[in-house]
Amino acid sequence: FDSPMLTPSVSLNDSIVQRLSMASLAVRDCRNRLYRDRYNLSIAGWQILVRLHEQGPAVQRQICLWNRTDKVTVSRAVIRLVRRNLLMRINSNQDKRSQYLFLTPYGQELCTRLVRDSLDMEGYLLAGFDREERSMFTTCLRKIGYNAVPSEFEYLAPAKEQTAAFSNFESQK
């Protein structure tokens, strides 16, 4: 792994990965506050609503995979969303232990507002970017997302081998 952008004289805070991570957290927090304050939605709550809005009905297990969220968090959020009449559950014909989650009409209406608010926020955050810059930025984000998926980040393998070698060395002392 070789990063021309990160040299020993450059701080980790100046690395693209760190800047991307910090920007991502700031945007996430901004959106979370908006949805919490305006709609009284938790992070898991709005993520479930948006996923169902975009993907259609699904079982909780599928939502966990889509959102990379644990079962307990999804289950608790679903209970709250059902109580608020934003979701409804319908038993699966194939698996009696599973229930499909559907947006209610009120849930669909709320999702329309969530999408509108998200697009408004995007417009605000990307103000000053021209069309070409937005397109290039989107392409870069897709590539970064794709590159982040490989299992166990292969470029760390030498570091793992060094750690294992160090552990063996320490155990022989």
Image (cartoon, rainbow, N blue to C red):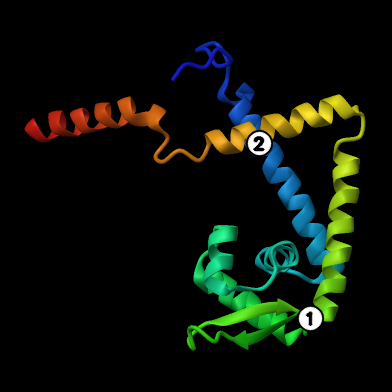
Disc 1/disc 2 C-alpha distance (Å): 32 Å
Badge 2 density bin: few <14, some 14–19, many ≥20, Cα 10 Å: few
Q: Nearer the viewer, residue 39 or 47?
A: 47
In this rendering, position of residue 68 left or right of residue 132: left
Q: Amino acid at mark 1?
A: Thr
Residue 164's quadrant in the figure? top left
State the image coordinates of residue 80 (x, y, percent, origin top left): 68, 81
- x and y percentages locating residue 5 in the rendered image: 59, 15
Q: Considering only order in the chain, which callout, 2 or 1, is on the residue closer to the N terminus?
A: 1
> In the rendered view of the protein, which quadrant contains the N terminus?
top left
Depth check: give the residue in front, 108 or 172.
Answer: 108
Residue that carries the numbered disc 2 in the rendered image: 142
> Dividing the picture into quarters, in which one does residue 129 lie?
top right
**Secondary structure under badge 2?**
helix
Q: Is residue 96 above or below residue 55?
A: below
Q: Is residue 129 visible?
A: no
Q: Quadrant of residue 16?
A: top right
- Identify the residue at the far front of this view: 94
Q: Which residue is mark 1?
A: 104
Type of the residue with mark 2:
Arg
**Which label is found at residue 22?**
none
* Left or right: 143 in relation to 28: left
Identified at 62% across, 32% down, the residue is: 143
